[in-house]
Image: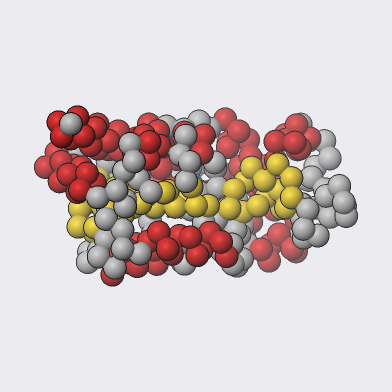
Amino acid sequence: MNQTSLKAVADKILSKPKNVAFTGAGISTESGIPDFRSPGGIWERFNPMEYATIEAFRRDPVKAWEMFRELSRILEEAEPNPAHLALARLEELGLLQAVITQNIDNLHQEAGSKKVVEFHGNARRLVCECGKSVEAELVKTHWLEGRDFPPRCESCGAIMKPDVVLFGEPIPRTASQEAMRLAQHPNVFLVVGTSAVVAPASYLPVVANKTGGCIVEINLEPTDLATGYAEHSLYGPAGEILPALVELVEAGLGSST
Ligand code: NAD
């Protein structure tokens, strides 16, 4: 971990409160949820382009639910890791306006983050094309135990869909507008654990950069943001870097009071 960059980023965060985090699957790998690049595991058995498109769901929802059921089991067991907790702490300190997440795992909320923009929805809810929406918690026992599988809508009987944005679906309007608003003129824009290639989410760091934001990339390896966009790049596990960063921020707050 580069301590000089870490200190520079902490100082920049301390300079103004309009800091925003933009997170992807990489922030949750240390909670046991594989990202699309992790070798082995769920995504090698269920190619997202075969199972996680809206066309695939409409064509064969029972097949799509084979993947959702496995993913649901993984999400059920996952707990927030130190990276999620550090972002919640930064918000509590008044130095993080919001987390914009591409994740569907609810771990930011479970860590205590209050302002979370769910760009790709949340797998803890199920929706039906007739408009009915239920908490996945209510039907969890049914689908995890194989009863009434896949879950059907109580109102119309159709197979329900997790309230997530599948490939080919639009981003929910409110989340999209709110994310775009937050991405404009930030102080620090922390880009954590995302390859930043899935559009339109990938435009957000670009908007933040073009409107004067300081882009800080936190990843295991350089992404496309490393050249031309990121002012600071911190390479290593987010579960180590973010707690260290927030510790420095807290030390800075302490020394200024
Ligand atoms: P991605 O799989 O394309 O990229 C993940 C990135 O995170 C990679 O750049 C990788 O180097 C980095 N990474 C992995 N582990 C890390 C760690 N411990 N610390 C820091 N960085 C780490 O993911 P994406 O860019 O988020 O795009 C994939 C899409 O699929 C998104 O919509 C995403 O939310 C969704 N998805 C979500 C989940 C989830 O909800 N947890 C899991 C898989 C995929």
The spot of residue 88 in percent (x, y) is: 40, 37
The spot of residue 35 in percent (x, y) is: 46, 47
Name the side, left or right, on which 2 lies relative to 238.
Answer: left
- Furthest-left residue in view? 4
The spot of residue 130 in percent (x, y) is: 81, 60
The image shows residue 232, relative to residue 27, as above or below, that is below
- Quadrant into which the C terminus falls: top left
The spot of residue 128 in percent (x, y) is: 77, 55
Question: Between 179 and 145, which is closer to the camera in this rendering?
Answer: 179
Residue at 47% in and 34% down: 112
Question: Between 66 and 128, which is closer to the camera in this rendering?
Answer: 128
The answer to whether residue 177 shows anywhere in this view is: yes
Name the side, left or right, on which 47 lies relative to 246.
Answer: right
Residue at 47% in and 46% down: 115
> Please, which colouring scheme is shown?
secondary structure
Residue at 74% in and 50% down: 133
Which quadrant of the figure has residue 189? bottom left
The answer to whether residue 251 shows anywhere in this view is: no
- Quadrant into which the N terminus falls: top left
Residue at 88% in and 55% down: 156
The image shows residue 218, relative to residue 215, as above or below, that is above
